[in-house]
Amino acid sequence: MWRGVVAHVTSSTLVGIDAVPIDVECEVMRGLPGYHVVGLATPAVKEGAVRIRSALATVGHDLPLKKVTINLAPADLRKPGSALDLPIALAVLLAEAIYDPAAVDRCLVLGELGLDGSVRPVRGVIAAAMLARARGLRGVIVPAACAGEARVVDGIAVHGVAHVAELIDALAGRGALPEARTAAPPSPPDGGADMAEVRGQLAARAAIELAVAGGHNLLLTGPPGTGKTMLARRIASVLPAMSHDEALETTKVYSALGLAGGGLIEHRPFRAPHHSISGAALLGGGSQPRPGELSLAHNGVLFLDELPEFARGTIEALRQPLEERAVTIGRVHGTIRLPASCLLVAAANPCPCGWLDSGARECTCSTGAVERYRARMSGPLLDRIDLRVAVEPLSLAELRRAEPAESSAAIRARVVAARDRQRARLHRFGLRCNAEMTARVLRMTCPLDGACERTLAELVERRRVMSARAIDRLIKVARTVADLAGQDAIDAGCLLEAAAFRREA
């Protein structure tokens, strides 16, 4: 029996946020006309035959009236989505031996086809570009709308095609593959919010500066209307700029969900999900696991307003990710690890009505209601929150004070200086801030002298219930206090200041 040419095109599919190579094989044989896709293709991939036929028709081609077999290797990996349309169409054209494959040789191809031949955006382009570079390929051929994402990966050629006709012209020698243009830089975040607008709340402001400087988790408690949400939303204005590696990591997560916006994300994310969010939406998951809000806040801030109103199971599921700074999702077909190194900021009222011990209004909650409300934030979860500070009601005179408070720019300058000290100290361990230190790194980089050991013993004796984890976290916060002060070593004052910000919630 006559056998045709077997064409090979390199593509990829997303598993979590990482791209996995896919070898698209096409063979055109004599026999009853048919189109067969094998290799655990989802319905979206199989339905691509209709899109491919219509798209090729716009440039004078059609699927061959022969037996067309498409194999997607490895065959035991499920292939979801429509990003394999373009590589399959290219494999069909090459299998007919009509065109010279030199123009697309050693290129990874990705793209969804429209019925009019247009090449539509797909998810995970930056991960595909990273994969192509790692495998030593010459470049990538991706939708023009996504080419800006691929351009942030150095060392490979990026070709952005808007229509299948551009690919046909390159194969026919009528022109070269279009080179992707550099994406326009994203617009900076809204600069209207500034810490200078916050009146009073010196303890909360100091806690925010400490949290941002060291990457420590923070809980703000207090009655309604005292400024907890206002303070939290201004944290974005004091965050240090992301490094290129951090920006690349963040963009990769957003690209996996199609949220990258066509270029490198250069500003730290600030995510504030509603308390009705599900556990899968917060941590990530699904039959085909995808990143959740915790991963979208990677290298940025996750703000959980009204923390006790979140479902108990949802916030309790944060325990392990907060400790490991990653989300591990297990499925029958394997385990996926998603990045989740972020600054957790939470806000809570002291009781259901919000006025317990406020001095502004009488609390109407029963003792049992208060206990049940506070029990929604478990001890193990609170143990992972380094800084806990009260946001007290202000007097009218303080609220109406005319002179502005210290600006975000001044606070950010101190934060950047502290982060620089941390990077210099922790660079050899591959860490970026004090909160990321493991127990081993903590003991190597944060020695305590005799006075500090005595102070620590007094703090533990006074609190009695302080856990081993809490002691390590206390030392990490003390190290950040020293970094903000420009000190090379932790002293007893640093430990006392760190302990002052760990009040009971």
Image (cartoon, rainbow, N blue to C red):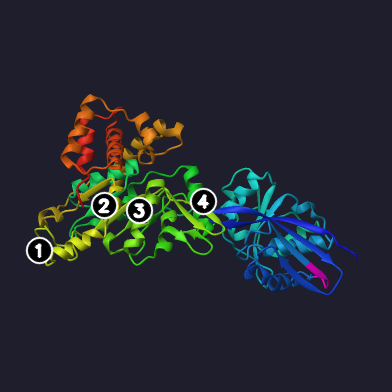
Q: Please tell me which residue lies in front, 283 or 266.
A: 283
Mark nearest the camera among 2 and 3 is 2
Q: Which secondary structure class fits the magenta region best?
A: loop
Residue 88 painted magenta: no
Q: Residue 446 location in percent, x, y?
A: 32, 30
Identify the amino acid type marked 1.
Arg
Mark nearest the camera among 1 and 2 is 2
Q: Which residues are magenta?
A: 64-68
Query: Mark on residue 264?
Result: 4
Identify the amino acid type marked 2.
Gly
Is label 3 in a helix, a strand or a loop?
loop
Is label 2 in a helix, a strand or a loop?
helix
Mark nearest the camera among 3 and 1 is 1
Q: Residue 415 location in percent, x, y?
A: 33, 40
Task: Please state, as top left, top right, bottom left or bottom right, where the N terminus lies in the image.
Answer: bottom right
Identify the amino acid type marked 3.
Gly
Looking at the image, tell me whether mark 1 or mark 2 is earlier in sequence order. Answer: 1
Can residue 181 be seen at all in this image of the molecule? Answer: no
